[in-house]
Amino acid sequence: MQEHHYFVCGYTVSEASRLRAAAEEIEVYESIDLMLDRLEKQKIIWLTLPAGEVTENIVQELMNQLSSDDIIIEAGNSYYKDSVRRAKAAKEKGIHYIDCGTSGGQSGARTGPCLLVGGDQVVCQELEPFFKSIAYENGNLYCGNSGSGHYVKTVHNAIEYGMMEAIGEGFHLLEASDYPFDLAAIANVFNNGSVIRSWLIQLAHDALVEDSNLEQIRGIVGSTPDAKWAVQEAMDKGISVPIIANSLFIRNDSQMEDIFSIKVVAALRNGFGGHGVVKK
């Protein structure tokens, strides 16, 4: 945002994060009060926090301090029904609550993320130049009313679960074969002209170059609520989503078993999102 000539200041409880921000000449404060005092009207708050209680608490604190026509852009992975509820509560105070599903991982934060925006159409149209300027080229979309941005992001993450599981299973089959395959070389050739070329395949290649048989990590992968929400939504609508559901269940199984396909999934998550891996 700062690189696109927007004034940015922030709040975090992490002293290390404040020091890193200061090195980039970004003002970051240790309290929400100080941050809000630094902002002029109209205040626009970009909120990126883990879904659940921490987001709920910060949103409530912001809504108690912001004024009419201020804007909260909630860019985490919240449950879409929570976003609908928060938008309704914010509207009662004259505050605009925009849900913004954000994808692209750590690199996207620097080179341009994919933004999936939901909320009041007039407000989102006013924010469109901002979203377009910080997003990847053609990487922002107004999805609809409140909750729609986080709904689309939930489905995005559920698809991601299935794709990573398929890549993991494929490389598990290659690793278990009777041929002495160079898995990194296969990942590389897959990413040059093949139907399955993708960033995830590139991340698989990078991980296998660093550790050819992923011997340094354990096949343990955590799960976030996104796939669970997607499976529940599918059940509510009577839609079959076996690949998404099984990819979630396999992650649960990974807490007990150490298998190669899950090592690949763990390496992919670490590659795009910086999610931790369990080292041997």
Image (cartoon, grey):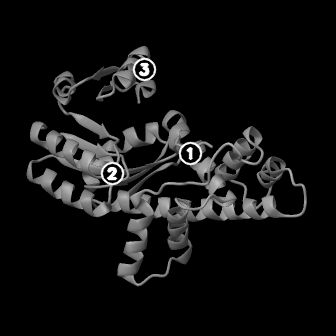
Going by the numbered disc 3, the residue's amino acid type is: Arg
Residue 37 screen position, x and y as percent: 16, 23
Q: Nearer the viewer, residue 4 or 153?
A: 153
Q: Which of the labelled discs sits on residue 51, or is there none? A: 2
Which residue lies at the image location 33% right of the left edge and 51% below the top edge? Answer: 51
Any part of residue 214 in sight: yes
Residue 60 screen position, x and y as percent: 16, 45
Kindly report the distance in space between the C-alpha atoms of the residues bearing marks 3 and 2.
Answer: 24 Å
* Residue ID for mark 1: 278
| Dot 2 alpha-carbon crowd within 10 angstroms: few under 14, some 14 to 19, many 20 or more | some
Going by the numbered disc 1, the residue's amino acid type is: Val
255 sits left or right of 238 in the view = right
Q: Are marks 1 and 3 in contact (CB under 8 Å)?
A: no
- Specify which label sits upstream in the sequence, 1 or 3: 3
Kindly report the distance in space between the C-alpha atoms of the residues bearing marks 1 and 2.
Answer: 23 Å
Q: Nearer the viewer, residue 117 or 151?
A: 151
